[in-house]
Image (cartoon, rainbow, N blue to C red):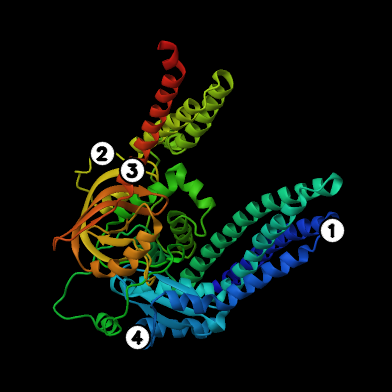
Amino acid sequence: MLAPAREKAMVNLFLRSILVLALLFGLLFAIGMAALTYLEAPIWLAVVFALGVLFLQYLLGPWILQLIYKIEWTDLQALDPTLSDFVSRICSERGIPPPRFGLIRDGNPNAFTFGHYPGDARLVVTTGLLELLGAEERQAVVAHELGHIAHWDFVVMTLAAVVPLILYMIFFATRRMRGGRGRSGGYAALIGLISYIAYIVSNFIVLLLSRVREYYADRFSAEVTGDPNALGSALVKVAYGLAAAPAKQGKDDARMTAARAFGIFDPKVAQTLALSGAGSGGASIEAMENAMHWDLWNPWGMIYELSSSHPLPAKRIRSLQRQAEAMGRAPRFSFRAEQPESYWDEFLLDLVANYLPLVGALVGGAVAAAAFLVYGVQIGAVGAFLAIVGAAWWMKRWYSYPGDLTGRLKVKDLLATVKVSAVRSVPGTLEGQIIGRGVPGLFYSEDLVMQDDTGFIIVDYRQPFRILEVLFGWIRAEKLIGQRGVATGWYRRSPRPHFEMRRLKLDNGEVVTSYYYPVTQALVYITFLTGLALMALDVLLVFGPRLA
């Protein structure tokens, strides 16, 4: 009964992909023809260069990934016999070349796929995925990755990426021609502007295509497993971190013994590629549904999704539940809860707070210009600009960084909070165990993953300079995995739930400190006070001689 529906879904995916690719190449063709018509320049050189770079990236990409991610290639049969049998069956039924399997030693549950084409695909999972997911959820996650292979997503997304790159190269190539006189210079400027606008639009279209293909990979998983609920629960546990560690038993699970035998590394995987689930035990259905409310109700979710390669988790889960109903299965999650209030007022307040420094710069610039033009003061004009910018910057930070960090927090409760964003935070302390890195397998990933008795969350490690974060991830982060401690900071959602760390105190007495907040706060005060000092100095210079 599912065969016609499956064929229809595949046809729809093919047609949508062709439509999007046609739209992208249509943009490229229009801009290219305009450029070739009106510009006497070898733009083909820029296009050839862009294509060469992209081809090189496509050719070397998998090899580079294997260099920067600590992956151990292994026999899935030895790692998880049940999962291996499942993969063999699906690959045989769907005509998919069996992928090469890799394992990353990291407690953060994750899975991803890469390669050149289906016959060259590699599928990587973390030990956290094997430890924290149930058997059906593991199969659903791996089936999602097999869907990407079956749909040739490597190739399609590479082709789609060609268009924004070439459009930008056309924009770049026209810059040196805009200074020309007459008609050619005007055409160059116009084509450059149109190219840049088309470049921005094409990027959003590529992201849309990526989101569409995620939905189809989800559909593929639901069809081959026969249970959309399995992938839905896996997505909830991974995307929101609602999974607790498996209960300890007297005898090790054979699956876990095999996983330990392949003890590998400290790595990670890009979170935009993350699709995995976590564990047995842990969160209730109510807690899982509460975690989805932010995606569905907070206006920030809609904004963030436009620039995301993946749909918001709640929307993917809702799509899976509809598929479950169409298959005659009772959906695991309910989306019938009514929104208790509008969150647009909080969103608008967040928006104002977020752009206060920009508004301050504009107002400060206007005040400085007026002071200079009307009164002829220079030092005072600079001082007014700095004082206004510093004040606006301080107001944003006062809004974004509440001072009371004494409240005890739980992951489950944080995820149920709807009134939170990248700007609006929840301050407090989290207690738990460090189970992995933010990006499993990436040797310099600085973020950590902390797990309490209700779930796990990314602990965002920030420093004033990026190089300090890289050094921490490279030298120190791996040594913290497995230790317990208390993290102090601010919970945010953007849309990934994460906890911005101020300080991490481990049970062994070790302390990890982030200096991002105090350093940037000091810069705010320095900017404001410098502005006041310059204004005062100008007053003395102007009126001092008169008073004397």
Relative image position of residue 185 (x, y in whole percent): 81, 48
**CB-based contact (under 8 Å), mark 4 and mark 3:** no
**CB-based contact (under 8 Å), mark 2 and mark 4:** no
Q: Nearer the viewer, mark 2 or mark 4?
A: 2
The label number, if any, that marks residue 403 in the structure image:
2
Mark earlier in primary sequence (1, 3)? 1
Near-viewer residue (198 or 502): 502
Is residue 36 among the parts visible in the rendering?
yes
Three-letter code, disc 2: Gly
Mark earlier in primary sequence (4, 3)? 4
At mark 3, the secondary structure is loop
Question: How would you rate the neighbour count of disc 1 (Cα within 10 Å): few for under 14, some for 14-19, many for 20 or more?
Answer: few
At mark 2, the secondary structure is loop
Three-letter code, disc 4: Pro
Question: How would you rate the neighbour count of disc 3 (Cα within 10 Å): few for under 14, some for 14-19, many for 20 or more?
Answer: many
Alpha-carbon span between mark 1 and mark 2: 60 Å
Disc 3 target residue: 425
Total numbered circles: 4
At mark 4, the secondary structure is helix
Q: Nearer the viewer, mark 3 or mark 2?
A: 2
At mark 1, the secondary structure is loop
Q: Is residue 100 left or right of residue 182?
A: left
Relative image position of residue 347 (x, y in whole percent): 44, 37
Disc 1 target residue: 40
Alpha-carbon span between mark 3 and mark 2: 11 Å
- Residue 451 lies in quadrant: bottom left
- Residue 54 lies in quadrant: bottom right
Q: Nearer the viewer, mark 1 or mark 2?
A: 1
**CB-based contact (under 8 Å), mark 1 and mark 2:** no
Disc 4 target residue: 81
Mark earlier in primary sequence (2, 4)? 4
